[in-house]
Image (tube, helix red, strand yellow):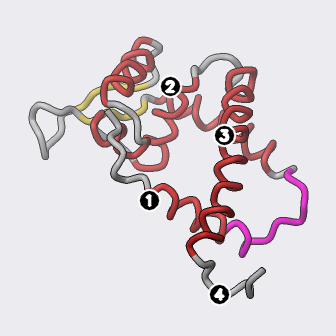
Amino acid sequence: MTDDATPLPPDELGRRLTEVYDLVGPLYRRAQRSVERGLTGGELSLGVRAVLTLLHRNGPMTVPQMGRAQAISRQFVQRMVNEAADQGLVESIPNPAHRRSSLIRPTEKGTAAIGEVLRREHALLRETGGGVTDAEVTACLRVLGELLKALDHVDDD
């Protein structure tokens, strides 16, 4: 075991990060089931929820921007945008930076829907136990960010 402030040697780092991957898979699948089973109140699919969350946090975006941000294909994002538009949750607006790639923004209905989902999610997450500290969350975000960067070479499409 090394000092907490000393970077791990590559072999030990690889073993420890494998432990992270081993937790991320089940965490993602449980979170997905939680969303599908009621966190959204049944009105939003997981994909539409992801689109609305991106727009809520980033403002209007193009479909390719959303795909890059979520590391998923443009085609999948387009299907989710179409589904959200069919439900009146998003709309296309002209993009001053690119004539052929419209910006997508939430409608009032979409803003209200994602606001409610995020409120429910916050209520659930605030009950997380274990005495987690801000420093631990910051470290977790940093490690997950590094793992994501290490996979930047993987093609999203």
Taking the spot 66% from the left edge, 38% from the top edge, the residue there is 28
11 up-or-down from 5: above or below: above
3 vs 2, front mark: 3
For the residue marked with disc 1, what is the amino acid? Ala
Q: Earlier in the sequence, mark 3 or mark 4?
A: 4
Helix or strand or loop: what does disc 2 sit on? helix
Mark number displayed over residue 150: 1
Mark number displayed over residue 138: none
1 vs 2, front mark: 1
Where residue 54 appears, as percent x and y from the top left, is 46, 42
| Rendering quarter of residue 124 | top right
For the residue marked with disc 3, what is the amino acid? Gly
Q: Earlier in the sequence, mark 3 or mark 1?
A: 3
Where residue 55 appears, as percent x and y from the top left, is 43, 41
User: Total number of numbered labels?
Assistant: 4
Can you say which quadrant of the picture contains the N terminus? bottom right
Q: Earlier in the sequence, mark 2 or mark 4?
A: 4
Q: Tell me if residue 134 is in the magenta stretch.
A: yes
Q: Looking at this rendering, what residue extends furthest in the left direction?
A: 99
Q: State the residue position of label 2.
A: 48
Around disc 2, counting alpha carbons within 10 Å, would you say few (fewer than 14), some (14 to 19), or many (20 or more)?
A: many
Q: Earlier in the sequence, mark 1 or mark 2?
A: 2
Can you say which quadrant of the picture contains the C terminus? top left
Helix or strand or loop: what does disc 4 sit on? loop
Around disc 4, counting alpha carbons within 10 Å, would you say few (fewer than 14), some (14 to 19), or many (20 or more)?
A: few
The reply to whether dot 4 and dot 1 touch (C-beta < 8 Å) is no
For the residue marked with disc 4, what is the amino acid? Thr
Q: State the residue position of label 4.
A: 6
Q: Earlier in the sequence, mark 4 or mark 1?
A: 4
Mark number displayed over residue 25: 3
Taking the spot 27% from the left edge, 37% from the top edge, the residue there is 64
Which residues are drawn in magenta? 128-137
